[in-house]
Amino acid sequence: MADAATLHAPTDAAAAERALRVDLAAAYRLTALFGWDDLVFTHISARVPGPEHHFRINPYGMMFDEITASSLVKVDLDGNKVEPSDFPVNPAGFTIHSAVHAAREDAQCVMHLHTIAGTGVSCQDEGLLPLNQTAMLLNGQIAYHDFEGVALNHDERPRLVADLGDKNAMVLRNHGTLTAGRSVAEAFTFMYFLERACAMQIAAQAGGKLRIPHDHVQEVVEQQSRGLGQAADILVWPALLRRLDRLSPGYAD
């Protein structure tokens, strides 16, 4: 007779995947709500629980505010659909996301955007500057990857992964931004701070001479940011889901 763990494993796995799909669909809807989407051309992916190394990504051709938990496409690390879907997968999205998922077991969710502020900072030689508290919360977490063209070449994946290393945020030079997290909540929260820091930088650069805090102050803020991932799961994400329930219901369908 099978033990209790074996009897409940399929149901537990299905429940875990269902919860992941709801969170991922919520991340797409929230991206649209924050005005971070770019028609159908950016991506958020999440690794499906289990040993298969499958992940969910957006159906190519759907707007982010249309995406639901049931519409997300399930693919393997070679980009092959493992469940039927009427929609294809963006090959550039697959290249970037599969690289990070394959290399980082801790990266359950990977988020990539082309916002005006994030892309603007990606075009600046100095990258993200530690101008304010929001930017300094990401000190020690920012990586950079040089632009190699539209991400269709799988040969780029080792270089992207090497540049990312163990960081949770990346500026894709002349391209956009990327974050990785141990959960959808964590990846989204890192992206919120990265995008907000980029917008603040662009705004500050439109004014007078920039004032950058001293190194020792930056170190203090970096130490104070250590609990950001935990706050994402416990505080930020539940609040964001409540907002989404009010403003864009139906994502869990």
Image (cartoon, rainbow, N blue to C red):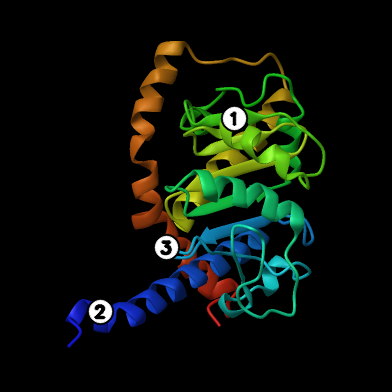
Amino acid type indicated by mark 2? Thr
Amino acid type indicated by mark 1? Asp
Q: Which mark is residue 6?
A: 2
Picture coordinates of residue 92 (x, y %)?
Answer: 75, 52
Residue found at x 40% / y 19%: 219
Q: Are marks 2 and 3 in contact (CB under 8 Å)?
A: no
Q: 61 or 79: which is nearer to us? A: 79
Describe residue 15's horizontal placement relative to residue 252 as left or right.
Answer: left
- How crowded pointer 3 is (Cα within 10 Å; few <14, some 14-19, many 20+) is rated as few
Q: Secondary structure at mark 2?
A: helix
- Give residue 55's quadrant in the image: bottom right
Where is mark 1, residue-wise? 163
Q: Secondary structure at mark 1?
A: helix
Q: Secondary structure at mark 3?
A: loop
Describe residue 172's horizontal placement relative to residue 170 as left or right.
Answer: right
- How crowded pointer 1 is (Cα within 10 Å; few <14, some 14-19, many 20+) is rated as some
Please say if 42 is above or below 227: below
Amino acid type indicated by mark 3? Pro
Where is mark 3, residue-wise? 51
